Image (cartoon, rainbow, N blue to C red):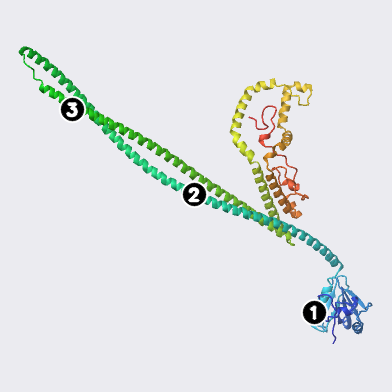
């Protein structure tokens, strides 16, 4: 029987671990030992013992006596009996009739198979593993390994760079989250203040309602008093009428009595003259005196009734004034209550709208952060497939829409002063436009005939004489898009006060964040989105109309959008396409 020994510097298993310090570099072999070998060149059933050494990717074999020299001198002979290259070889176990632990080595460049045999299953397993490991060392694998090393180094540098960018982005997002947390705390504080104001409004409304109920009760009491005064007034009026009627009857009766008294006196005077006797006057005079006393009493009652009627009228007038005062106070309280209720509802609506907008912004921000994290994970992942690429494209599209929406909101906020100004003056402008259109319709037939040729056009004398041709030139010039845009570019610096510096900085920050994020997008994503290669730096925002297409140069520079308020006036008195 024989034993096999090995000296290994790699993590591969070996039969014997030799001292690497006592060996020369050339003696560091992977495995050595004695194996059985069958002749290679001719078919034969004879097996012979040979000393085999595995050095890198080669299998060297010697005579069996070389084993003692190798172990004694600690170096191997550089003139072996044979050398078998193991690169790309197929090594597998095989059973032979006389050798149960045989091994077969085959290659497409070999004219036959190489058969070796070990003494035990353990040695067979060890030699098979070492031969298979050594077969992996080829020139192509070495080149591939070097390329992989370079690729891994480049990927490592790229990952380190992306890691630093992600750390910077994380710091920015942390600052943004801190700012959002502060804004949320500020919103909660405002919510508490609004709740306190709401409670105060409710208390004031409750007090006003109590006061309104009290005024309502006082008004009802005043109304009942007015009804009583009116009833008493009616009774006094009836009493006055009855007294007046009684006075009239007494006056008539007095008049009749006086007539009768005068008639009786005349008769008595006649009789007295005849008989020279004094007339009896006592009965009629007493009756007349009673009538006068009764009339005096009735007059006193009438004066008393008139006095009471005046007092009742004054009282009724005072009650009416009091009722009007209470009515005005009640109406004022009702108006105040309605205004407070409207203010309360408006404050609640504004609070709900603000909370809703804040929740929508937070939701969109969370979606954008999720898309950014997903994109970062996709960029950090080494394994990429079609599904991941589609997901990354969707994340980039989502981020693009998010930043476009932010820029649109910034543009809208920047244009808000102009919108408010136009909304204030739109009615007056419409009225003036209608009057101007009517005036121009009345004078359209004579305005062009009286117009002198403009000296600002570079036209010849013949063209200046042709009024109709000059009119067509003026209309075409007023409808020219480039002419209006050039006028707008001249006027744009004077309109710079409309767009605040803060809005520009906000748009610049948004575009910078989008540029930082999209710079890490792989080329296949940019091609999938239909965009070009990224620029070296994001463009400066010179106006709120800057679009995302200018960020990477995805398309031609957009044509400037001219506000309707600054469309240059055409020569025919109209405003561009907004003619009446």
Query: If the image is split into quadrants, where does the C terminus sit?
Result: top right
Query: Label 1, on which residue?
Result: 125
Which of the 4 image quarters holds residue 263? top left
Query: Label 2, on which residue?
Result: 200
In the image, 336: left or right of 96?
left
In this rendered view, identify the residue nearer to me: 30 or 543: 543
In the image, 394: left or right of 230?
right
Is residue 386 visible in the rendered image? The answer is: no
Foreground mark, 2 or 1? 2
| Element on which disc 3 rests | helix
The label shown at residue 294 is 3
Q: Upstream in the sequence, badge 3 or badge 1?
A: 1
For marks 3 and 2, give the CA distance: 71 Å
- 121 w.r.t. 165: above or below: below
In this rendered view, identify the residue nearer to me: 80 or 417: 417
- Residue at 60 percent of width and 54 percent of height: 184
Q: Upstream in the sequence, badge 2 or badge 1?
A: 1
Foreground mark, 3 or 2? 3
Query: If the image is split into quadrants, where does the N terminus sit?
Result: bottom right
The 10 Å Cα crowd at callout 1, few under 14, some 14 to 19, many 20 or more, is: some
The 10 Å Cα crowd at callout 3, few under 14, some 14 to 19, many 20 or more, is: some
| Element on which disc 1 rests | helix
* Rendered location of residue 423, percent (x, y): 60, 37
């Amino acid at each position: 029987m024989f034993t096999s020994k090995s000296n290994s510097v790699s993590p591969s298993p070996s039969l014997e671990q030799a001292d690497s310090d006592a060996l020369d570099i050339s003696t560091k072999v992977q495995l050595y030992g004695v194996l059985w070998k069958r002749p290679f060149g001719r078919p034969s059933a004879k097996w012979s013992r040979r000393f085999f050494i595995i050095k890198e990717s080669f299998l060297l074999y010697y005579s069996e006596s070389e084993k003692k020299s190798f172990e004694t001198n600690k170096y191997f002979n550089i003139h072996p009996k044979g050398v078998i290259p193991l690169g790309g070889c197929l090594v597998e176990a095989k059973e032979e009739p006389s050798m149960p632990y045989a091994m077969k080595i085959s290659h497409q460049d070999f004219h036959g198979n190489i058969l070796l045999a070990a003494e035990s299953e353990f040695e067979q397993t060890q030699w098979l593993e070492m031969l298979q490991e050594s077969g992996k060392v080829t020139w192509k694998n070495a080149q591939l390994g070097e390329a992989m090393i370079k690729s891994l180094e480049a990927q490592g540098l790229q990952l380190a760079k992306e890691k630093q960018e992600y750390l910077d982005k994380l710091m920015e997002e942390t600052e943004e989250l801190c700012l959002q947390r502060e804004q949320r705390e500020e919103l909660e504080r405002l919510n508490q203040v609004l709740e306190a104001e709401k409670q105060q409004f409710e208390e004031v409304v409750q007090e006003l309602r109590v006061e309104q109920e009290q005024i309502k009760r006082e008004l009802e009491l005043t109304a009942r008093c007015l009804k009583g005064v009116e009833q008493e007034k009616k009774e006094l009026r009836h009493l006055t009428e009855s007294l007046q009627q009684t006075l009239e009857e007494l006056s008539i009766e007095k008049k009749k009595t006086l007539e009768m008294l005068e008639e009786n006196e005349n008769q008595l005077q006649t009789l007295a003259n005849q008989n020279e006797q004094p007339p009896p006057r006592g009965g009629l005079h007493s009756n007349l005196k009673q009538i006068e006393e009764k009339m005096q009493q009735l007059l006193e009652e009438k004066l008393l009734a008139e006095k009471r009627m005046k007092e009742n009228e004054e009282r009724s007038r005072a009650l009416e004034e009091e009722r009007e005062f209470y009515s005005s106070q009640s109406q004022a309280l009702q108006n105040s209550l309605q205004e407070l209720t409207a203010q309360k509802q408006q404050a609640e609506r504004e609070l709900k709208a603000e909370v809703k907008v804040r929740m929508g912004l937070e939701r969109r921000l969370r979606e954008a952060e999720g898309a950014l994290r997903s994109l970062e994970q996709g960029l950090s992942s080494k394994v990429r497939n079609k599904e991941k690429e589609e997901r990354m494209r969707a994340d980039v599209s989502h981020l693009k829409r998010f930043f476009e929406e932010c820029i649109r909101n910034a543009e809208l906020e920047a244009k808000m002063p102009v919108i408010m100004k136009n909304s204030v003056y739109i009615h007056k402008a419409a009225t003036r436009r209608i009057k101007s259109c009517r005036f121009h319709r009345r004078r359209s037939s004579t305005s062009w005939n009286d117009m002198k040729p403009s000296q600002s056009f570079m036209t010849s004398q013949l063209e200046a004489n042709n009024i109709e041709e000059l009119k067509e030139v003026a209309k075409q010039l007023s409808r020219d898009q480039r002419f209006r845009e050039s006028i707008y570019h001249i006027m744009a610096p004077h309109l710079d006060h409309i767009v605040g510096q803060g809005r520009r900085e906000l748009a610049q920050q948004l575009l910078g964040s989008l540029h930082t994020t999209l710079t890490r997008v792989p080329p296949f994503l940019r091609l999938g989105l239909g965009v070009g290669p990224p620029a070296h730096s994001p463009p400066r925002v010179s106006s709120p109309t800057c679009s995302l297409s200018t960020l990477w140069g995805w398309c031609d520079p957009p044509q400037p959008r001219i506000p309707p308020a600054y469309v240059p006036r055409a020569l025919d008195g109209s405003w561009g396409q907004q003619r009446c």
